[in-house]
Amino acid sequence: MKKIAVLFVLLLLNACAPSKVVYQWSNPEYHSFEAQKVLIVGMTPDEGLRKLFEERLAQSLEQKEVDAVRSIDFFEEVFAKTTLDTTALDQIEMQLLNAGFDAIVVSQVTGSQDKVTLTEQHSGNFKDASNFKDYYFQHQDAYKTSQWETYTVYHAEALVYCICPDKQRELRWKAHIDLTETQSPEAAIQSYITTLLKELKKQRILLKE
């Protein structure tokens, strides 16, 4: 079996959920890509969120019979506090191969958008208004109860690379995942992990369908 390694790099946000996949791509040369051992790296300046993310994802993968190792256990602070050149990355790749890892998953937040929506508090069931009188009658409470709600949508991407001995970090799969702002970091992390694992399983990447 080809050696692969999984390095999950996630730039976690303080709060974002729920999440959804808005784009995904699979390497057409491969119909599936399974992994037995995964290294998880959460990339965020918040050490607490990093540990929480790595712990939750490791547990989720273990439940799916994939051996998962947190980066804080394997590399400690190498990724978080060290700038790595290509030579250092090659050495890390060899360490992963020698340790029996199968794949690399890289994920990070690439941007965000502020959204605004107008909500109205009404009672009763409204019908489509065919004229101004009906429309105004149904919605006149908007003067009193309408309010603008603002929220942030964060854009993240996840990429799966093969680091097989005969190929250097070849891209096998990638996805763009949008996360909507919420107040709970735990909910954000769980939503991201659930969405990511569901799509990986659907595309037969790392996990068996």
Image (spheres, helix red, strand yellow):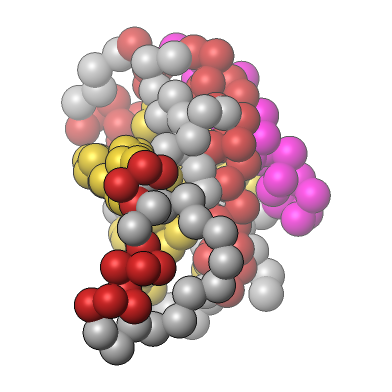
Q: Is residue 52 above or below residue 23?
A: above
Q: Quadrant of the N terminus?
A: bottom right
Which residue lies at the image location 73% right of the left edge and 39% below the top edge?
59
Judged by its main secondary structure, the magenta piece is helix
Q: Is residue 88 above or below residue 170?
A: above
- Which segment did they paint magenta? 53-77
Answer whether residue 110 is visible to the viewer in this image.
no
Which residue lies at the image location 49% right of the left edge and 13% below the top edge?
47
Q: Is residue 165 magenta?
A: no
Which residue lies at the image location 39% right of the left edge and 53% below the top edge?
141
Classify residue 182 as left or right of residue 106: right
Q: Quadrant of residue 136?
A: bottom left
Q: Is residue 140 or residue 86 the one in the foreground?
A: 140
Q: Is residue 145 or residue 78 the one in the foreground?
A: 145
Q: Is residue 60 magenta?
A: yes
Answer whether residue 25 is visible to the viewer in this image.
yes
The residue sitting at the bottom extreme is: 130
Q: Is residue 39 or residue 21 the one in the foreground?
A: 21
Classify residue 56 as left or right of residue 114: right
Q: Residue 134: image x %, image y %?
A: 34, 78
Q: Residue 49: image x %, image y %?
A: 53, 21
Q: Is residue 133 above or below residue 18?
A: below
Q: Residue 131: image x %, image y %?
A: 25, 84
